[in-house]
Amino acid sequence: MALFSTLMIVGVHEYLYRKNYYNTAAKLYLRNVQISLLGKMNTSYNEVDFASNSQPTPEGVPHKTYLISRTRCAREYFLLIMVMSRPYNFKRRSAIRITWAGGHSEELWKTVFLVGQGGGDTAQDQRLVAEEEMHGDLIRGAQREHYRNLTLKTQVGLEWASKYCNFQFLVKSDDDVFVDPHAMINHLKKPDTPKTNLYTGCCYYKGTPFRRGKYAVSWEEYNKTRYPAFCAGPAYVLSRDLVPKLVNLFNNVKNPLPLEDVYIGTLIEKIDGVDVVLHPGFRTLQHGRCIYLSDTLAYHLVTTEGCMIQLFNLAMKEREEKQKQH
């Protein structure tokens, strides 16, 4: 209860501080930061159509994807967590920051948020720029934010991780996912957990493509009747050695699949020696219930900030009890 109260106080203080900061600083930073983000790109983000996969051509920047950010990790981390987040999901990012993203003494992991370009709401864009200046944990891409652009966003994140951060394992997650970094690190440090060629999560084998609906792909986009094995997009793990290998394969796919998790599966299939490993610790909350199960590594469909805090508190309580037993 004390931990919950502390987190809520921290959250309130952060909100009040950000509210004042956004009103006073955002306008001052907006122009300079946007220029810094976009650099000398020949194609502005407003000109990048969500259905187009043509790459922007920034001068003097050897990026293969829509990656804008050049921020480097200050040190090496055991675990890098990249969270896919829509530009204006401020509350979700805040809830993650005050719970599992950091604020720990061990400094074994780092959490960043992958964010595309918004819809042109000036006030929201100013707030986003101020958030970036305040926290320094946003990795930006020039692609427009859209569900069919999640593959492009994943490419952005993997290229950034490959070029600008040193780590041993990477977790790609969404902002409606609760990740337990302590449990994740404990699992990855086990002697029987592979340290290379590791690709694990809630995985599917011999999935059938949908030709209609939200997850539809056309025959032109994918002309086979079965998908390769892949791990579901809400959360999966890659060992460090696989990240640059995946980035190197980006050139081999002219029009990447719009389903980013299946897309990663198609690339993994091209890399020798990689098994797609199903792990029971990657779970999905059912029917909106915020219930924590022991030994969870990642929970999907955490739709409220309160549930994120509740799951974090329960995970911390479990961890403390285990430590007392030892």
Image (spheres, helix red, strand yellow):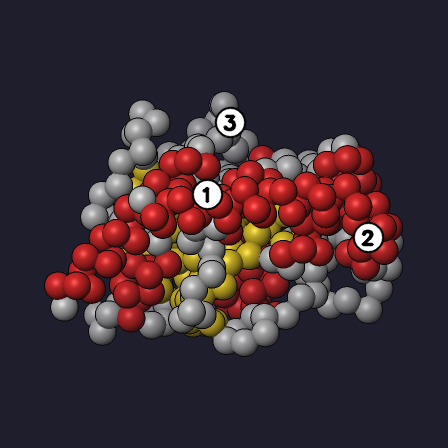
Residue 231 horizontal side relative to residue 317, left or right: right
Q: Earlier in the sequence, mark 2 or mark 1?
A: 1
Residue 259 horizontal side relative to residue 153, left or right: left
**Foreground: disc 2 or disc 1:** 1
Q: Earlier in the sequence, mark 3 or mark 1?
A: 1
Q: Which mark is residue 214?
A: 3
User: The residue under label 3 is which amino acid type?
Assistant: Lys
Q: How many marks?
A: 3
User: The residue under label 1 is which amino acid type?
Assistant: Met
Q: Residue at x 20, y 64 (%)?
A: 323
Q: Which mark is residue 29?
A: 2
Which residue in the structure is indicated by mark 1?
A: 8
Q: Nearer the viewer, residue 289 or 54?
A: 289
Mark 1 is surrounded, within 10 Å at the Cα level, by few (under 14), some (14 to 19) or many (20 or more) other residues, namely: some
Q: Which type of secondary structure does the marked residue at label 1 adopt?
A: helix
The image position of residue 168, as x and y in percent, is 43, 72
Q: Distance between the Cα atoms at labels 2 and 1?
A: 29 Å
Q: Which quadrant of the figure contains the N terminus?
A: top left
**Foreground: disc 3 or disc 2:** 2
The image position of residue 171, as x and y in percent, is 43, 57
Residue 232 horizontal side relative to residue 138, left or right: left
Can residue 248 be seen here? The reply is yes
The image position of residue 125, as x and y in percent, is 75, 40
Q: Which quadrant of the figure contains the C terminus?
A: bottom left
Q: Which type of secondary structure does the marked residue at label 3 adopt?
A: loop
CB atoms of marks 3 and 1 within 8 Å = no
Mark 2 is surrounded, within 10 Å at the Cα level, by few (under 14), some (14 to 19) or many (20 or more) other residues, namely: some
Q: In the figure, 227 relative to 109: above or below?
A: above
